[in-house]
Amino acid sequence: MKQYDLLIVDDEQRFADMLARRLNLRGCNCDVCYNGREALNILKRKKLDLILLDLHLPDIYGTEVLTRIRKYDESTPVIIVTGHGTEKDRRECMQQGAYAFMHKPVGIDELMTILAEIGEMSA
Amino acid sequence: MIGRFRKILGSLRPEFYHRSSEHLDPYFTFTDYRKIWGIGIFLLAATALLPLMVVTIIYYQLIQKSVDSELILRTERVTSNARRAVTFFLEERLNALRFTVNEIDYDQLTNPDHLAELLRNLKLGFGGLTDLSVISHLGIQVAYAGPFKLEGKNYSKQAWFVECQKYNFYVSEIFRGYRDLPHIIIAVKSFRPDGTHFILRATLETERLIQTLSSYETGEHADIILVSRAGIIQTPSKYYGDIFEKMALPVPDYSPRTETVMAIDGQRRSIITGYAFISTQIADTPFILMVIKQKAKMMGVWLELRSKINWFVGFAILVIIFVVAITCTFMVNKLYLADKAKAEAMAVMEQNSQLASIGQLAAGVAHEINNPLALINETAGYVKDLFIIKEQYSKDDELLENIDYILEAVARCGTITRQLLGFARKFDVKIQRVNLNEVISDVLVFHNKEAEYRNVNVFVDISKDIPEIETDRGKLQQVLLNLVNNAFQAVDNGCNLDITALPEGVNKVSITISDNGCGMPEENLTKIFEPFFTTKERGKGTGLGLTITYGLVKKLHGNISVKSRENEGTAFIITLPIHLQEEMRKDENSFGR
């Protein structure tokens, strides 16, 4: 199985860490950050296979982070993982080119399926 | 029968008279419809009736005045004419005696034959003369012509003789003489060439005088009489006493002219009295001429007209009152029905809003729970992963640590659920002791995240002097939640929201929720509590939030007011009683229920 490079962006630190550990156990290589600015910095220096992005970030709102990512990176898939997502948020994110819009809690198997899909597409 | 009558009467009674929907009371614009109804009828009736009454009274007074002055004028004319006639009657006879004593000397007068001749001639000329006598200066009757043998009689001690000596002339009151017929004595004094004097005396019958008087009588209800200055009736009277008896009216004050006065007689009849003190050119007389007219009888035609007008005015007043009462009842009932419909709509709206806010709350809570649940999910999933993927699960510190995370996350969920349940319970209408600090914190919990994301600074300043207040916790919470929601919508990111509470007097507290957001123009301030008034985009706001808030504050017996400046911010000030139960009791007492 291919080792995927992932970035988890979520202000809920423990959630982000835990998800990273679980994905790492499944052969992924996860980076974790807790706000939008840091996420954008990481993206500038590293090529990633997938970004898991929360909407309610303390500094920049998730949709705005997505918009900025898309300015210089049109291809990296972004999955929105949120606890408070509204229909409006969903529509906006999909328009901005999000790969999926998921509500917390997210099933790990579901996530792995999507990851596999992405792997197949990029292969 | 009586029961059926009552039933009909009950159905006629307007709806507002027996309002039964007490649960709608707080939503009514007006509370006391019976009072409005009463005031309405009174004001309308007063406005309609007052001019009618005033005009009628003025009309009566004008008529009364003109009738009075007409009556006075007529009475005065009759009195004046009668006075002239009576004066002339006496004057004529006194002049005849004076002419006699001046023309015929004493010796001739004392000749009985000559005196008898003279009496005959005077009777022919004037009529009504009974006898004629000559009295010497000593008071002895020296000659007499007439039906009685009175020669030699001594008059020296009699009052008339003394008076005639003093004043040269004398006119007596009317009195009954020897023949029991009323008559008058007139006497004239004359001097003899030797310097002594004598008196020529004549007795007059009163029949002619009475005839003269009665010829001036006008109508049934007028009385023309002569009375003495002591008030003794001298000629027959119809209404005020028998002849030679005291008159039933007071004797008028002396006046040299003819006078007319209004008075009330002994039988409480309104009368007009004309009077004149009779005085001839030669001598004063003891007579007062009185013309007495009964006003009511004189005014018969006018009184009949007045009673017709009274009937008409009375009928008009009844019609006006009836129309006013019907109109007022109809209008107040319409007002009541409109108000009731509004109150019902408001009640439904409030209920809907409560349901909607519970729904919103539930959604919010569910969202809040999602994050901890996600953490539980991941942590539990990781534990499971550890069990499946790694085999070193026993005596594993990491495992224990992660189980702690799960427990912590569950505890977080528990807190939120408890708060949700607590909030739901707070919709009960029961009064309880409420700590303002707690309520405000509970409300702010729902905005913590938003405040954090939007960088809105929330300052809470509750005065330490504020005691726990007795009120409906749920309603207070909804009021505060609505206002805080509004404030959050009005402010830009980075603005401030202040919540302060201060005691106001002994029995009240005031809570101020102010922001430094967009504010609103002055013309909107008066309308913001009106239903369906909104400044939000079409379809965004219902315009009911503040109306419901207002209704809730009123339910808590409080007041809400607003201050705002465009681009500077808005402040809502709520004043609440510390003891709601007491206020409700007072209210019940004042409504007398």
Image (tube, rainbow, N blue to C red):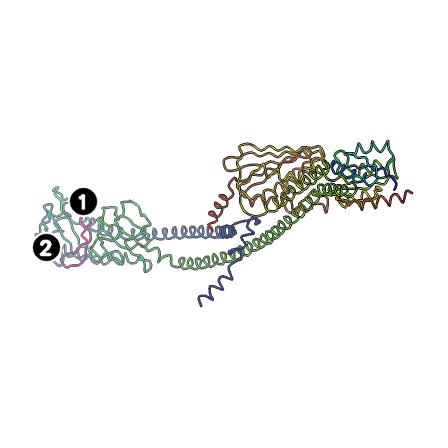
- Are the residues tagged 1 and 2 within 8 Å (C-beta)? no
Q: Quadrant of residue B574?
A: top right
**Above or below, comparing residue B592 to residue B491 in the picture:** below
In the rendered structure, does residue B181 fall within the stretch colored magenta?
Answer: yes
Query: Viewer-proximal residue, B206 or A108?
Result: A108
Residues rendered magenta in the picture: B171-187
Q: Residue furthest right?
A: A123
Amino acid type, callout 2? Leu
**Residue B318 in the image: x percent, y percent?**
47, 58
Q: Which disc is residue B168 wearing?
A: 1
**Above or below, comparing residue B62 to residue A93 in the picture:** below
**Left or right of B318: which side holds B187?**
left
Amino acid type, callout 1? Asn
Sequence-earlier tag: 1 or 2: 2
Residue B125 visible in this rendered orientation of the protein = no
Q: Which residue is mark 2?
A: B150
Q: CA distance from mark 1 to mark 2?
A: 22 Å
Q: Classify mark 1: helix, strand or loop.
A: loop
**Residue B41 in the image: x percent, y percent?**
50, 53
